[in-house]
Amino acid sequence: MLETAFTRLVGVTVPLQLAGMGSILSPELAAAVSNAGGLGQVTFAGIPADEAKKRLDRLAALTARPFGVNLLIPYFDEAVFELASRRARVIDFFWGDPDASLVRRVHAAGALASWQVGSAAEAKAAEAAGCDFIIAQGIEAGGHIRGRLGLLPLLSEVLDRVSVPVLAAGGIGSARSVAAVLAAGAAGVRVGTRFIVARESNAHPDYVKALIAARAEDSVRTDRFHVECPLCPSTHGVLRSALEAADSFEGEFVAEADIGGERRQVRRFQGTPPFKAFSGRIDAMAQYAGQSVGAVTRVQPAAEIVAELFAGVSAPSRSEPVSVSA
Ligand SMILES: Cc1cc2nc3c(=O)[nH]c(=O)nc-3n(C[C@H](O)[C@H](O)[C@H](O)COP(=O)(O)O)c2cc1C
């Protein structure tokens, strides 16, 4: 139990939000993180409402604790949004201008709203839109990167400008980094890469192996995985090996899957990360990874990852964020 403004607001016991991670996130992984005391999440992006409902039913069957639904603005779907707002504790948005009308609708449905941001200006806009908490994403992150600053400079700027709780995201893989951002004034952390290899995750086993073999230096920022990508142009944190494999691949499609009876093919340099349903050149798919990948060493239950991230971490001695007068 580690109490912060985030845990009090959301009703969890560990100040951790599982990062949105597309179809890498299974209901099983979200439930395991919630059951371990954090805020588990599922992402709904580009999936129909009936599939979203199935995943929510499964998640609700696996945990009675609070969970969130992560939505990407470029994939916004009215039916999925309505459904999720009624069932989740938190609706978590990413990749779009903070939108007060959406936040009002989340609140009207009885949920909290959060927004992941990449700059202090975006954080201020999220607060002004009524968000209950904000996530500051540094460029150390895996997946799509919203801003241009490293986590600590960004976190400092954001904490100086908003008064809602702020979580830190990007490159956080160890208890040391959790302790560091809490000491800096963050109300918690949002972690992605470390959970890709959780036993409950939906990541393809070859992707899991590549992450385990990688060092922190193998996470590179690129803008190359841009094909059919509504979040592009953007930079994204991926494994160098995936970038090299896609570069030297000569065909049009790197992988394919049968999803709900439909054959789906993934083009070279398309941004879909490799989840279990895919076969083909998994090594050449978008193997997103943050600089936290150096802390990924083995497949573990999600609850064990949560415990490791908070081992020996206590609440910072100040209950208020550090403030420095000019
Ligand atoms: C495989 C992967 C997929 C991601 N997909 C999403 C997504 O669907 N929605 C979202 O809000 N963020 C997404 N992100 C970014 C995360 O929200 C978060 O900023 C990032 O994981 C934090 O850095 P870390 O991976 O070093 O912990 C993704 C990250 C990864 C690694």
Image (cartoon, helix red, strand yellow):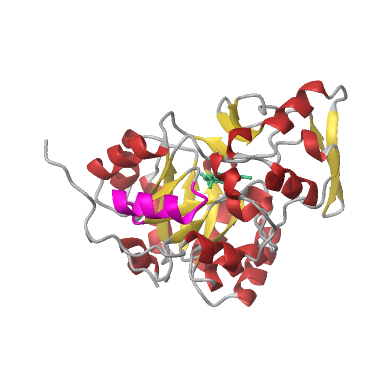
With 264 as the anchor, is 302 left or right in this view? left
User: In the rendered image of this protein, does residue 38 appear above or below residue 290?
Assistant: below
Tell me the quadrant of ligand 1. Answer: top right
Which residue in the rendered view is the most extreme toward the left?
326
Residue at screen point 68% across, 52% down: 24
Between 307 and 260, the one nearer to me in the picture: 307
With 168 as the anchor, is 50 left or right in this view? right
With 170 as the anchor, is 204 left or right in this view? right
Which quarter of the rendered picture does the C terminus lie within? top left
Residue at screen point 64% across, 49% down: 22
Residue at screen point 43% across, 58% down: 106
Between 20 and 310, the one nearer to me in the picture: 310
Is 262 colored magenta in this rendering?
no
Between 66 and 189, the one nearer to me in the picture: 189
Magenta range: 172-187
Place of residue 173 in the rendered image (x, y in percent of width and height, measured from the top left): 52, 50
Place of residue 161 in the rendered image (x, y in percent of width and height, measured from the top left): 24, 41
**Total tally of numbered discs in the picture:** 0
**Quarter-of-image position of residue 128:** top left
User: In the rendered image of this protein, does residue 119 appear above or below residue 171?
Assistant: above
Residue at screen point 35% across, 65% down: 314
Is 173 colored magenta in this rendering?
yes
Place of residue 101 in the rendered image (x, y in percent of width and height, measured from the top left): 39, 48
Which quarter of the rendered picture does the N terminus lie within? bottom left
